[in-house]
Image: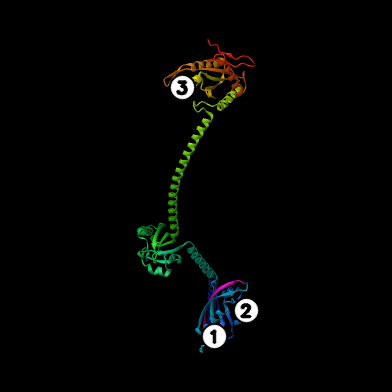
C-alpha cells in the first residue's frame, strides 16, 4: 500500500514538473515572438545543428523541421547568410572556439527572398580537455532597428546639408548645468570652430555669451533670463565676434523645455548666420539713399530744364501769338486784317443762313485824310488813324467786326441784323463820330467818312460779292459829295444815298 502511494505521489510530482516545463516553454516562445529572438545549439562533433527553438526557425521563415534539414552541415548554414557577410560571420564564429564566445551582426537571406538584419551572440561548451563540444547561440532580428538607424543617419545627413545650405545650426542648452548638451556641426561652424572646440570653451552661461557684441550683450542676457523664468519663446538678432575676430550677425529662435516641477530645464533653438543678409540690407539702404540723392539732383535739374523749356515754350507761344496776331491784324491800329475780316464775314454769313437773318457789310473810306497826312506827316497821320479806329469801334456792337484793309479804308461787318433801320442808324452814327473834330498834339483837325453798305442776301451771298458791292456803293457816295453813306443797289440801279437832312 505504501509503495503504491509513493509511486502515485511520484507520478503527480513528475506531471507537475512537466506542466511547469510546458509553461516555461510557452513563456519562452511568447518571449521570443515578442522580442523577435530565437536560439539554437550547434553540435561540433557532427558539425550540424543539434536543436533550435520555434523563434529561431521563424527568423529564417521556416519551421523547426525545415531548419534541421537545411542546417545539417556548416556549409549549408552559411548559404543563408548574405554573400557579403559570410566571411565576416565565419571568422567571428570560429573565434569563439578560442575565446569561448562571439557576437556579430549580419544579413540573413530568407527562403521567401526577404533580407533581415540579425544580431547574434554565442557561447561555447568545452570538455575537460578544452575541446569544444557544443555552442549555444541567441539570435535577434534587428531589421527594424537598422532601418530606424538608417533613417536617423539619413535625417542627420539631410539636416547637416540643410544647415550648410542656409547657414543654420541647432542647439540644446541645459539651464541647470549651464552647458550645452548638444550642438550641431552647423552651430559650431557659424562660430568658426568645431563641435568639440566649442563645447570645450563653453562651461557656463557667461562663457556662452562672452562672444556677443558689447552693444547687444544686455539684450541677449535679458532674453535668456526671461525665457528661463517664463518659458516663453524668443526671437532675437545680435552680433558676435568669432575666435578669428570676424563679426557675424546671428538670428536666434528658441523655446524653453519645462520640467515636471514647472521650471525650465533646457533651451532648445536654432541660430542662423544672417551676416550676408545684413550686408545686403545695408548695401540696399546705401544704394537707396544714393539713388534718392541722385533722383533729387536729377529731379532738380529736370525741374530746371522743364522750367527753361516752359519758358521757351511760353516765349515761343507768345511769339507765335504775336506773329499770328500780326498776320491777321493791322500793326498800327490792332484791328483785324482783310484776311481775318473775310474769315469772320464767312462765319457771319453762315450764321445768317442758319438763322435766316440779314448781315451787312460797310466799306468806309476817310475823306480828306491825304491832305492831313501831307500837311502834318505820316506819324501824325498814324495817330489820326488810331483815333478813327477807336471811334469806329465805339459806334458798333461787340458782336460786330471792324477791320482796316488799306491806308484809310475800313470794313465793318454787322452780324445778325434784324432790320435795315439798325444798319442805317449805325452808319449815321459812324458818319457823325468820324466827323467830330479831334485834337492831336495840340493840332485840331477833322475828317469825314464815305460809307458804302451791302446787305446779305440782297446784294450778294458771298464775302467777295458783298465787299465788292459795298466798295462800289462807297465810291458812289464819294462821287456824290462824300461825308455820307449809301446803300448798294441790285443790277444797274443807282446807289441810294442817305438823306443828308
Which class describes the residues within 10 Å of circle 2: few (<14), some (14-19), or many (20+)?
some
Residue 118 on the magenta segment = yes
Residue under the point 61% across and 16% down: 489
Residue 51, x across and y down, in percent = 58, 80
Label 2 sits on a secondary structure element that is helix
Residue stretch rendered in magenta on the structure? 113-126
Where on the picture, by quarter, is residue 191? Answer: bottom left
Camera-side residue of 128 and 460: 460
In this rendering, is residue 9 above or below 189?
Answer: below
In this rendering, is residue 17 above or below 440?
Answer: below
Where on the picture, by quarter, is residue 49? Answer: bottom right
Where on the picture, by quarter, is residue 47? Answer: bottom right
Label 1 sits on a secondary structure element that is strand
- The residue labelled by disc 3 is 376
Q: Are marks 2 and 3 in contact (CB under 8 Å)?
A: no
- For residue 133, which numbered disc appears in the image? 1
Which class describes the residues within 10 Å of circle 1: few (<14), some (14-19), or many (20+)?
some
Image quarter where the N terminus lies is bottom right
Measure the alpha-carbon separation of dots 3 and 1: 163 Å
Residue 491, x across and y down, in percent = 64, 16
Q: Is residue 400 visible?
A: no
Amino acid at each position: 500500500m505504501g509503495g503504491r502511494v509513493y509511486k502515485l505521489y511520484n507520478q503527480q510530482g513528475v506531471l507537475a514538473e512537466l506542466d511547469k516545463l510546458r509553461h516555461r516553454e510557452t513563456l519562452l516562445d511568447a518571449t521570443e515572438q515578442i522580442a523577435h529572438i530565437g536560439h539554437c545549439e550547434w553540435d561540433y562533433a557532427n558539425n550540424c545543428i543539434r536543436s533550435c527553438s520555434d523563434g529561431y526557425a521563424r527568423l529564417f521563415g521556416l519551421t523547426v523541421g525545415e531548419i534541421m534539414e537545411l542546417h545539417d552541415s556548416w556549409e549549408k548554414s552559411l548559404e543563408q547568410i548574405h554573400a557579403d557577410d559570410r566571411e565576416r560571420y565565419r571568422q567571428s564564429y570560429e573565434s569563439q572556439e578560442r575565446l569561448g564566445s562571439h557576437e556579430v551582426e549580419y544579413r540573413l537571406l530568407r527562403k521567401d527572398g526577404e533580407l533581415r538584419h540579425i544580431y547574434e551572440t554565442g557561447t561555447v561548451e568545452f570538455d575537460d580537455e578544452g575541446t569544444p563540444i557544443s555552442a549555444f547561440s541567441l539570435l535577434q532580428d534587428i531589421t527594424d532597428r537598422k532601418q530606424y538607424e538608417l533613417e536617423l543617419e539619413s535625417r542627420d545627413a539631410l539636416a547637416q546639408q540643410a544647415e550648410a545650405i542656409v547657414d543654420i545650426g541647432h542647439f540644446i542648452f541645459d539651464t541647470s548645468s549651464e552647458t550645452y548638451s548638444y550642438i550641431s556641426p552647423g552651430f559650431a561652424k557659424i562660430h568658426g570652430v568645431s563641435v568639440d572646440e566649442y563645447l570645450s570653451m563653453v562651461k557656463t552661461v557667461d562663457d556662452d555669451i562672452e562672444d556677443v557684441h558689447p552693444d547687444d550683450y544686455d539684450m541677449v542676457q535679458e532674453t535668456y533670463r526671461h525665457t528661463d523664468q517664463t518659458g516663453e519663446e524668443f526671437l532675437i538678432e545680435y552680433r558676435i565676434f568669432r575666435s578669428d575676430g570676424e563679426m557675424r550677425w546671428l538670428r536666434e529662435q528658441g523655446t524653453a523645455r519645462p520640467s515636471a516641477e514647472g521650471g525650465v530645464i533646457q533651451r532648445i533653438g536654432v541660430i542662423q548666420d544672417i551676416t550676408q543678409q545684413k550686408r545686403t540690407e545695408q548695401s540696399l539702404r546705401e544704394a537707396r539713399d544714393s539713388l534718392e540723392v541722385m533722383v533729387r539732383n536729377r529731379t532738380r535739374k529736370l525741374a530746371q530744364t522743364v522750367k527753361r523749356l516752359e519758358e521757351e515754350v511760353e516765349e515761343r507761344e507768345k511769339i507765335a501769338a504775336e506773329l499770328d496776331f500780326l498776320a491777321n491784324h493791322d500793326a498800327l491800329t490792332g484791328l483785324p486784317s482783310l484776311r481775318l475780316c473775310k474769315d469772320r464775314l464767312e462765319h457771319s454769313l453762315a450764321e445768317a443762313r442758319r438763322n435766316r437773318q440779314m448781315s451787312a457789310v460797310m466799306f468806309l473810306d476817310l475823306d480828306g485824310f491825304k491832305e492831313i497826312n501831307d500837311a502834318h506827316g505820316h506819324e501824325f497821320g498814324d495817330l489820326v488813324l488810331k483815333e478813327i479806329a477807336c471811334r469806329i469801334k465805339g459806334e458798333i456792337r461787340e458782336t460786330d467786326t471792324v477791320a482796316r484793309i488799306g491806308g484809310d479804308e475800313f470794313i465793318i461787318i454787322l452780324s445778325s441784323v434784324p432790320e435795315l433801320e439798325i444798319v442805317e442808324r449805325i452808319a449815321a452814327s459812324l458818319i457823325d463820330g468820324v466827323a467830330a473834330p479831334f485834337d492831336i498834339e495840340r493840332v485840331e483837325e477833322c475828317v469825314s467818312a464815305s460809307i458804302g453798305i451791302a446787305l446779305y442776301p440782297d446784294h450778294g451771298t458771298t464775302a467777295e460779292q458783298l465787299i465788292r458791292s459795298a466798295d462800289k456803293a462807297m465810291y458812289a457816295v464819294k462821287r456824290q459829295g462824300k461825308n455820307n453813306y449809301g446803300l448798294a443797289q441790285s443790277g444797274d440801279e443807282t446807289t441810294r444815298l442817305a438823306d443828308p437832312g
